[in-house]
Image: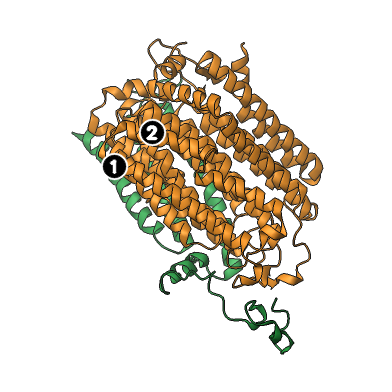
Chain colours: A orange, B green
Amino acid sequence: MNLSAVLTPLPVLIPTLAAAVTLFAGRTPRLQRSIAVAALSAVVAVCAVLVYLADRDGTIALHVGGWGQSVPGMGPLGITLVVDRLSSLMLLVSAIVLLAVVFYAIGQGIRDGDERQPVSIFLPTYLVLSAGVCTAFLAGDLFNLFVGFEVLLSASFVLLTIGASTDRVRAGIAYVMVSMVSSLIFLIGLAMIYAATGTLNMAELSVRLEDIPSGTRGAMFAVLMVAFGIKAAVFPLSTWLPDSYPTAPAPVTAVFAGLLTKVGVYAIIRAHSLLFPGGALDNVLMVAALVTMLVGIFGAIAQSDIKRLLSFTLVSHIGYMVFGIALGSELGMSGAIYYVAHHIVVQTTLFLVVGLIERQAGASTLQRLGGLAAASPLLALVFFIPALNLGGIPPFSGFIGKVALLEAGTQDASVLAWILVGGSVVTSLLTLYVMARVWTKAFWRARADAPEGNLADVSPSSLIDDSEVDIDHADRDDVGRMPVGMLVPTAALIAVGLALTVFAGPIFAFSERAAAEVVDRGQYVSAVLTP
Amino acid sequence: MSATVVDVVPLILIGGLTTAGVYLLLERNLTRMLLGLLLVGNAVNILILTVGGPSGNPPIRGRTTNGETATADPLAQGMILTAIVISMGIAAFVLALTYRSYRLSRAEEIANDPEDTRVSELSDKSAGAIDEDLVTHDPQRDTDAPDELDALPGHEGSR
């Protein structure tokens, strides 16, 4: 029994068990919180060791319950969990983000006095979400990936509609319906692949799919891409996202924005490089990436609510990752992998900052915000760094990721790749414009200059209570106070974002090794199929 | 010959269920959307059952059924069971949401996103004037007004 075999299932097991325990501990919030924090910290530690092991030993495959190969030449019988460099990196970044956000949510909950409110389901659901995310990253067969998606989706339904106010119910219904349709399309894809090959194990599929006629392969690939495209919010399948995310409480939106779409991107990477290499749909993906970037960022320009604005930039930047994947080269893939890690951290941070802005100013729409730089220089700093990072200003990680993608695009040198290089640069500039717009409006101008600057929400959208009543800004009693419990996790995530910049050399080298492993496939297949 | 009929019937069933399901999903009424979701879900379940191969002996060692030579595929049925459990849970959740939506708004139709509507109305206004820039003139906030005016009623504290 070696170490990796013990550690591999833990990112799924720990949150699942902790979810069960916290559910029973619902009446003692302190115990519940400590269990959740301890569990997610343990997951971070386990994932860090897995990154090290995957980098040192190569791909780790675990046949759960010992149901490995029974007949030589056939795939494993049971569920396989696979950790390679890509999935271990995704696991580690997600675990860090999940831990930071749980601290933030606890800080917000304590601030809002949730001991008096029935939010005891928040932490268990959050832990189930964590387990679902980890399952999806660890899945070695498509059906397990489907189950991982379903687990995280079910948890996200509950988190998105927590408190069940009018707005959240409306947004939640649209979100549930879209997600379920994408899951059904995924299931149709699974049925097609199972009919054609008789297996759903990804390693075995990558071998067996080579014998399938290219037309059939293309059809199966396209069905999977539609399913994953909805989850990853690739245009034209992205319109659900800006409608549903902004209504949720700040920590929920943050973790959704950071992780859920990236699970979709991860699935696209796996399908594109492991199952269907050869780039059958690369041109389609390239065009989709370009349109996603541009439509997303133009949408962001039109918004005045910061949460919606950030949701649109989220959609827009998914385009960068799809661009890197569609290039199909190792450099493109490593750029995409680095960009995913960067974007998970920076997008989550920005949504957490919006939560702080709501605390500080009692509003999250640009129509009401102003004067924040003077009112709270600390908040200005906390917004400024991730905003520049998202806009791709050197030396931040957003710049490094974009440079890698542009380099990969110029190396590819096809006409379409050049158009995408142009599109990426334009999108990057427009992202900077959007961030500058938020900066000038919310931070620089006087609050009196905002059209509705005299108004404030009666309470910032808290975990459970989401009242829509407006009051006079002057009448709010808690304006200007940022709970330390919310500020510290945000600052910690900013530090993680900066670490992606400071240690860009080793991290990018790691993502290059991960990309080489992903593009090569041989290691993955042999790790799973050799008993 | 009869084998082909047996093969085609489930496919027609799948097509019919999917069609009806998609039609219902496109409604705004929540109950119909849920029914549509369930219909498509069942269609996909039958699809998985169909692609799992023909019926046969139960997949247990030593158990046979009269006249069967092949063994049925247990994996397809396992996957369907998982999918059924998931869709049952989601259906319960959607029903709860529907009830909540009905309690809140006395309607079980899904409404438009108000912020979306507001932003799309912006495009009707003159270009360039995004409305967080549009300040209606308020003498109390006019910092460019001469200080002498401060004494006048309505101009207090213009600085």
Amino acid on which disc 1 is placed: Leu
**Residue A197 tag number:** none
Residue B93, relative to residue A100: is it above or below?
below
Residue A37, relative to residue A435: is it above or below?
above
What residue would you read off at disc 1?
A: B11
Hey, which quadrant is residue A525 in on the image?
top left
Whether residue B51 is visible to the viewer of this picture, yes or no, is no
Q: Marks 1 and 2, Cα distance to the nearest angstrom?
A: 48 Å
Secondary structure found at label 2: helix
Amino acid on which disc 2 is placed: Glu
Q: Residue at x 52, y 17 (%)?
A: A60
Q: Nearer the viewer, mark 1 or mark 2?
A: 2
Q: Nearer the viewer, residue B120 or A127?
A: B120
Which residue ends up furthest to the bottom in the rendered image? B153
Q: Residue at x 70, y 82 (%)?
A: B147
Q: Residue at x 58, y 81 (%)?
A: B137
Secondary structure found at label 1: helix
What residue would you read off at disc 2?
A: A407
In which quadrant will I find the N terminus of chain B? top left
